[in-house]
Image (cartoon, helix red, strand yellow):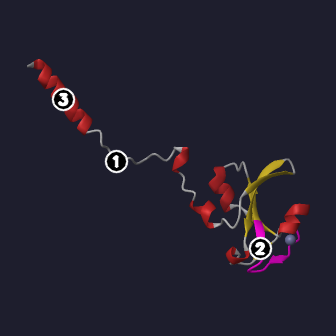
Amino acid sequence: MEHHAVLGTILSAKAGTKMPRKNRRNSAEEHQPLDLERIAGGFKRTEFKRDKDWNVQPISASRALKEYVCPGCFGQIAVGVPHVTVWEAEAMFGDEAGLRDRRHWHSRCWEIH
Ligand SMILES: [Zn+2]
């Protein structure tokens, strides 16, 4: 019967919808929070300072594995010194770009900045 033929077509069409899910890059949930978790030495917070919102991520001593130059005092942040990383909360190219551009500050220098 005609009906059966039509039903068969619908069923096989449905079976064929198992397409590989790629190219879903524009979905906001897709970006991996890998970076955020890797640098997590404490809870990230947002601070409003100098007319901007900033993400402030504390870095614990055990995660301070490199030397950095603090933009506040231009002094060195030695390995093993707990400090904070700071990046713009509303970075022009999104959170990931902001993360790449994050700066390491002495906690105290950031506080008084
Ligand atoms: Zn400093």
Q: Is residue 17 magenta?
A: no
Please name the amino acid that badge 1 sits on. Answer: Pro
- Left or right: 4 in relation to 92: left
Label 1, residues with CA under 10 Å away: few <14, some 14-19, many ≥20: few
Q: Which mark is residue 82?
A: 2
SS type, badge 3 = helix
Quick check: can you spot residue 113?
no
Residue indicated by mark 1: 20
**Quarter of the image that includes the C terminus:** bottom right
- In the picture, residue 61 is in which quadrant? bottom right
Please name the amino acid that badge 3 sits on. Answer: Thr
Answer whether labels 2 and 3 touch (C-beta < 8 Å): no
Report the residue that reaches farthest toward the top. 2
- Left or right: 47 in relation to 2: right
Q: Which mark is residue 9?
A: 3
Which residue occupies the foreground of this view, 80 or 51? Answer: 80
Q: CA distance from mark 2 to mark 3?
A: 64 Å
Q: Nearer the viewer, mark 2 or mark 3?
A: 2
Answer whether labels 2 and 1 touch (C-beta < 8 Å): no
Which residue sits at x=65%, y=52%? 95
Q: Earlier in the sequence, mark 1 or mark 3?
A: 3
Indicate the quadrant of ligand 1 in the picture: bottom right
Magenta-tinted stretch: 72-84
Please name the amino acid that badge 2 sits on. Answer: Pro
User: Within 8 Å of ligand 1, the CB of disc 3?
Assistant: no
Which residue sits at x=74%, y=80%? 80
Q: Earlier in the sequence, mark 2 or mark 1?
A: 1
Total marks shown come to 3
Q: Is residue 85 above or below residue 75?
A: above
